[in-house]
Image (cartoon, rainbow, N blue to C red):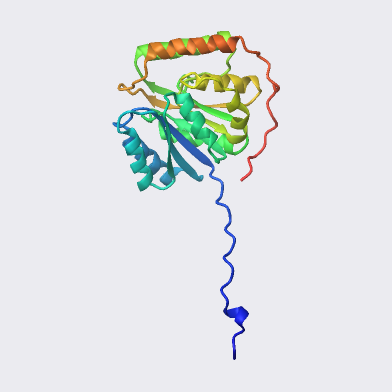
Amino acid sequence: MRIPDTAAAPSAEPRRRPAPRVDLEVVIPVYNEEETLARSVLRLHNFLSQEFPYSWMITIADNASVDATAEIAQALASDLEHLSVVRLEQKGRGRALRAAWSRSHARVVAYMDADLSTDLRALLPLVAPLLSGHSEIAIGSRLLRSSRVDRGFKREFISRSYNRLLHAVLHARFSDAQCGFKAVRADALRELLPRIQDESWFFDTELLVLAQRRGLRIHEVPVDWIDDPNSSVAILATALEDLRGVVRLAFRSRRGPQTQPRPLRTLPS
């Protein structure tokens, strides 16, 4: 039997379906972290691969490192799946988060400090309320009663004093503005990110204050947290910068377009 020419002709290439949307993108903002980056990223990657039940990816946001951080980040991205790198030529943790979060297509974006001071077992409790639609923002807190924190008196005193200041001046209802362990739903991020002015350490506080003023739900998770004795953060300079940010926000309107929590809903897949 002769096969018709039309049957012998190659079929058209099937249309490719778009890749499924990732549930979570974890951003690690880094500046001169050549000593800890590989160890931390491998630890996080292994944890997500073995214990995290949702789809995920990791992004290293390198903001103008001048050591070998950029080379190490690129090597990790070449070796590991679900890992990308964003390189910025200007410093600023807020700037790094803005750049990485702005390009994200994940349902929920998160960030954590490069030293992974927070126990990773808190990640699922952090993210789950956002994926379910219960809350718009989630933060790790070192100041909740059930948190377990190992850090020196100086840092503990400064942290508690700063958060008391936020409660008194900005009427903050969250307990810990500065813990480097936060997550935001994509729809809430699109609403908040253009309104955040800070590009450095006050970025976190401004994000939370603006979210509270707009009536968004902020979920808090107690964390186990161990202070990094080799942290390069300049405490005094950061504190002064934060105080300037508090003054700026104190003069902004305390009423946003939304002052009541939104109806609960589930994020689309």
Asked if residue 110 lies left or right of residue 228, the reply is right
Q: Position of residue 187 (x, y in %)?
A: 62, 34
Q: Residue at x 66, y 13 (%)?
A: 253
Q: Which residue is depicted at the point 58% across and 56% down?
A: 17
Nearer to us in this view, 161 or 10: 10
User: Does residue 257 sit above or below 251 in this rendering?
Assistant: below
Q: Position of residue 236 (x, y in %)?
A: 39, 11
Image quadrant where residue 74 sits: top left
Residue 53 visible in rendering: no
Residue 38 located left or right of residue 98 = left
At x 44% / y 25%, what residue is drawn? 93
The image shows a total of numbered marks equal to 0
Q: Is residue 130 visible?
A: yes
**Residue in the foreground of this view, choosing between 188 and 144:** 188
* Left or right placement of residue 252 versus residue 75 in this view: right
Q: Quadrant of the N terminus?
A: bottom right
Q: Is residue 43 above or below residue 205?
A: below
Task: Locate residue 45, reporting x and y percent.
Answer: 39, 42
262 up-or-down from 177: above or below: below
Q: Residue at x 67, y 34 (%)?
A: 264
Residue, far bottom: 1
In which quarter of the view is residue 102 placed? top right
| Front one among 109 and 129 | 109
Image x and y of residue 168, in percent:
56, 8
